[in-house]
Amino acid sequence: MPAASSTFDYEAALAACAGGDRAALHRIYQHESRRLLGVALRIVRDRARAEDVLHDAFMNIWTKAASFDATRGEGRGWIHSIVRNQALSAVRSSGREVSADEDAIEAIEAEAVANAAPMAEAFEINADLGRLDECLERLDTPKRNSILLAYVDGCSHGEIAQRLNAPLGSVKAWVRRGLLSLRECMA
Amino acid sequence: MNADDLHVLAGEYVLGTLPAARRAEVEARMSNDAALRTAVEQWQQKLLPLNEVAAPVEPSAALWSRIETSVAAKVAADRGTRPAAARPAVAASGWWNSLRLWRGLAATGFAAAAFMGIVVVGKLAQPPGPGYMVVLVGPQDKSPGWVVQAGTNSQQARLIPLGKVDVPADKSLQFWTKGNDWKGPVSLGLVRPGESKEVPLDKLPPLEPNQLFEITLEPYNGSPLDRPTGPILFIGRAVKII
C-alpha cells in the first residue's frame, strides 16, 4: 500500500472529481480508505461511527473537490484533513468531553499532586515521521503525550488530563507550549 | 491577537482540542482571515505524518456502495436544476415535480397507454374490468416496459412485465408511487425483472387518476433512503378505465 500511495496522483484525482468523474472518487477511496478509516476510528472509537465519518467525508471530498487549490498544499493532506475534521466534529459535537466533569478533574488534580512520578510515554511510534519525529523528540514527555493524545486519539483537554492523570491547567499549558516548540523546531 | 496566540489557536484547531463552539468560530473566521487560514494549513501539513500512527483498518464492503449511492443522489439532485434536455436520465430526486417529463409523457405515454390497453388486455388472465391502468414507459424513448392494473377499490395492484430488463447483479429494481398531494413517493417494494408482482395497496390512500408510478434502478436490496436514489427506468400515470 505505501508504494501505491506514493505514486498515486491525488491532485489529478481531485481535479477529475471536480469535473464530475465518479471513478476518480473511487480511485481515491481504493488508495486511501484503509488509512483514512484507521485515522477516523482512533478518534471516534466506534467502528460504525467511523464508517459514517468516512461516508460524510467522501461526500465532502466530492462536493469540495473544485475548491481544492494545489498551490496551497498537497491533495493527500487535503483529503486527510477533511476526514480528521469530520471525525473531530463528530466527537466534539456529541459532547464526549463532558465525561471529564469538574469533580473528576479536581480529584485527578489532587491525586496528581500527591503522585509526582515521572510520566511514561503514552505512545510508541513505529512510523517514520521525518522532521516531525525529531521535533517531537525534543519535547518533554508531558508535552509530547498531550500533543499525540490530542492529534491521534482526538482527546479534548479534559480527556488528556484523565489519561495522563494530570491537572487540566497543566494540560492546557503543555499543549500550548508543545505547539509553540514544534512550530519553532519545524520552521 | 499576537503571533503566538494565532499559531496556538490554529494548532489547537488542527489538533482538535477546541470545544465545538470554538471550532465553529475558527471555521467561520478562516473564510476571511487569510493569516489564520494559512496558519491552519501549515499545521495540517506539519502534523500530517502523525496520521501514519493509526493502524489502517479495512472498511466494510458496504461502505463504498453507500458512498456511491449518496454521490449518485447528489449528482442527480444537482442535475435537477439544469434543463431537462441536458440530462441523460430524469433526476431521481424531484422527478415527481418534473412538469416537463409529464408534458412529454402526456403526449406520448398516454397514447401508449391507450394502445397498450388494447394489446395487454388480451394477455391478462382476467379482463381488468373497471379500475385503473398504468403503462410504465422509459423516460427517454417512451417504450413501454411494464403495466400496472388495479380494480377501482382494489386493495392490491398487479405489476406485469412486458419484456425482460437487464439488471446488474449488484443492483435491484424498486417500484414507487406518488399521489398528487403526497409529499414524496412511497416504495411498493422490489421488483424482479421479467416477473409479475402483486402489490398490496391497503396501507395507501385509494388510487386516484394521474397517480404516478415508477421503477428505479437502486443499490442491491433497494434504496437506502425513503425515496428513490437511482435513475428512473420506467414511469407512468394511472388512467381510469371503464
Image (cartoon, rainbow, N blue to C red):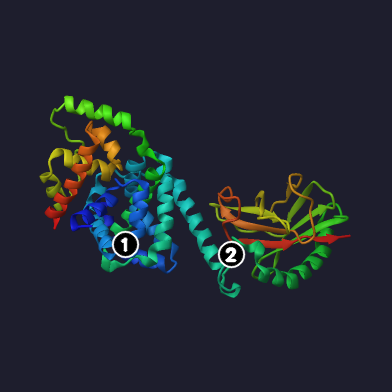
Query: x, y (%) of residue B103?
Result: 71, 72
Residue closer to the observer: B235 or A104: A104
Element assignment for label 2? loop
Residue B97 is left or right of residue B123, and the answer is: left
Query: x, y (%) of residue A143?
Result: 17, 41
Query: x, y (%) of residue A174?
Result: 18, 42
The chain letter for the residue carrying disc 1 is A
Residue B175 seen anywhere in this rendered image of the structure: yes
Question: In the image, is residue A41 above or below residue A8?
Answer: above
Residue at 19% across / 42% down in the picture?
A: A173
> On the image, numbered disc 1 is attached to which residue?
A10
The disc label shown at residue B91, or none? 2
Q: What is the number of callouts on the image?
A: 2
Q: Work out whether disc 1 and disc 2 sit on a shared chain.
A: no
For marks 1 and 2, give the CA distance. Answer: 30 Å
Question: In the image, is residue B102 above or below residue A151?
Answer: below
- Quarter in which the C terminus of chain B is drawn: bottom right
